[in-house]
Image (cartoon, rainbow, N blue to C red):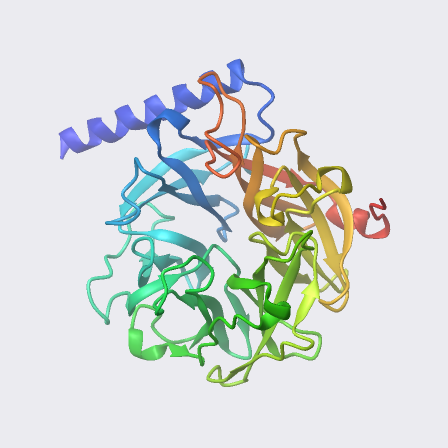
């Protein structure tokens, strides 16, 4: 036991020294560094997720992907704690067998919901000590929800009409081609049920890829957001791969029935133009401003090139909508002029009073040659937008 404690202490000190050194040597890295993995490791920062505990502490998580990782066998995730509103972060736990996961707090416990590996089983874990220790999903009574090949991202898990809702994708298909293999669906569970017991979860119908959508330019949909629409109905709003020449960012809106069992999509009006719709985004409703807010990889006109829009991730912007159909871009949050080796992506964010806090999977310069590319991030960074509602009256025009 003493040996384990010494190992954890050594890891903790090493991590803090590494982050402190980087903060001094590479001051241009935006935000507060939560975690770092150099490109040479071939372990890249993925799946940022953040949660605010009832005592005001923040918990963050991420996983590793890439050739140096174990993402295809038994993925590894990492958990961090901040007791000073994000000014500093301490490593809490390493979890073997957790990937693409979202943190959330529910009825006295912290949960982590995702898969056990790249296209693996859907699993959930529970922690009752702020993320230091976690349950092990060994069977359908303690966290193994669905066996198979599943996909997701850290998108919202919301409470509505007495149920928790979370969008997922089934990756089991006749093809293994990215995008085309994904069928979208919604998971839900009564709010007072045991979240670790598989029988309590309901899965909606699964809607598969259709090659004729978007006049034949549809490349797939994924990383859906569970959102309550203006009419009170549950929606799954998804990232869309648009393969048209000079493609614009689009998203798709899937309607979920009240009981969580049916899913419907109309290709004639179910696609919408949305800033950053070709990359992972997060949407949440704010009752004070009566707006839906989003942080997304908006593409300013000067960065629109012949590359697919999904490959341009050098800009993150604060956006909002009154109706989930028309979106306004209010403020550039993060940006770098280089699109090849710099990226701010997979942002996960939360409201905190008048502020908005978020984590970014950040590909940026370091003292070892920088990120491998825009996609293969070497940093997890924390950020805060103070008095975010003040930006609702301003728009970026080009």
Kindly identify the residue that appears in the image at 58 percent across and 19 percent down.
27
Which quadrant does the N terminus fall into?
A: top left
Residue 235 in view in this figure: yes
Picture coordinates of residue 100, whole percent (x, y) = 40, 53
Counting every numbered tag in the picture gives: 0
Choose between 108 and 74: the one closer to the eye: 74
Which quadrant does the C terminus fall into?
A: top right
- Left-right relation of 2 to 349: left
Kindly identify the residue that appears in the image at 60 percent across and 37 percent down.
383
- Left-right relation of 109 to 345: left
Kindly identify the residue that appears in the image at 66 percent across and 36 percent down.
334
On screen, 264 above or below 35?
below
The residue lying furthest to the top in this view is 25
Picture coordinates of residue 90, whole percent (x, y) = 41, 33
Picture coordinates of residue 111, whole percent (x, y) = 39, 58
- Left-right relation of 156 to 117: right
Kindly identify the residue that appears in the image at 49 percent across and 44 percent down.
57
On screen, 383 above or below 129?
above
On screen, 130 above or below 39?
below
- Left-right relation of 66 to 290: left
On screen, 215 above or below 75?
below
Picture coordinates of residue 48, whole percent (x, y) = 47, 45
Choose between 112 and 330: the one closer to the eye: 330
Q: Quadrant of residue 199?
A: bottom left
Residue 224 in view in this figure: no
Choose between 217 and 373: the one closer to the eye: 217
Q: Quadrant of residue 11?
A: top left
Q: Quadrant of residue 225?
A: bottom right
């Amino acid at each position: 036991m003493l040996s384990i404690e010494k190992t954890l202490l050594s890891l903790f000190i090493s991590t803090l020294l590494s982050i402190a050194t980087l903060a001094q040597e590479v001051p241009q890295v935006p935000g507060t560094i939560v975690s770092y993995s150099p490109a040479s490791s071939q372990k890249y920062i993925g799946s940022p997720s953040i949660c605010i505990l009832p005592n005001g502490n923040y918990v963050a998580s991420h996983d590793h992907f890439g050739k140096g990782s174990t993402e295809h066998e038994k993925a590894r995730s990492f958990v961090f704690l901040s007791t000073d509103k994000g000014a500093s972060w301490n490593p809490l736990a390493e979890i073997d067998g957790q990937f693409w996961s979202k943190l959330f707090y529910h009825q006295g416990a912290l949960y982590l919901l995702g898969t056990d590996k790249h296209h693996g089983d859907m699993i959930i874990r529970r922690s009752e000590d702020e993320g230091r220790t976690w349950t092990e999903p060994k069977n359908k009574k303690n966290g193994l929800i669905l066996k198979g090949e599943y996909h997701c991202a850290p998108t919202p898990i919301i409470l509505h009409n007495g149920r928790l809702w979370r969008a997922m994708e089934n990756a089991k298909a006749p093809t293994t081609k990215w995008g085309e293999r994904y069928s979208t669906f919604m998971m839900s569970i009564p709010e007072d049920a045991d979240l670790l017991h598989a029988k309590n979860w309901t899965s909606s119908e699964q809607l598969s890829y259709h090659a004729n959508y978007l006049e034949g330019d549809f490349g797939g949909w994924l990383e859906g957001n569970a959102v309550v629409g203006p009419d009170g109905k549950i929606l799954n709003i998804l990232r869309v791969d648009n393969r048209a020449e000079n493609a614009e960012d689009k998203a798709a809106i899937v309607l979920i029935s009240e009981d969580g069992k049916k899913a419907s999509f109309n290709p004639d009006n179910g696609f919408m133009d949305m800033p950053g719709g070709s990359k992972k985004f997060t949407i949440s409703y704010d009752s004070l401003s009566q707006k839906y807010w989003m942080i997304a990889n908006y593409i300013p006109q000067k960065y629109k090139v012949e590359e697919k829009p999904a490959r341009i991730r050098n800009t993150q912007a604060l956006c909002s909508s009154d109706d989930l159909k028309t979106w306004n871009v209010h403020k550039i949050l993060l940006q770098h002029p280089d699109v090849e080796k710099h990226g701010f992506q997979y942002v996960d964010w939360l409201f905190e009073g008048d502020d908005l806090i978020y984590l970014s999977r950040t590909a940026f310069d370091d003292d070892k040659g920088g990120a491998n590319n825009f996609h293969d991030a070497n940093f997890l960074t924390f950020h805060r937008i103070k008095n975010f509602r003040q930006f609702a009256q301003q728009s970026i025009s080009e």
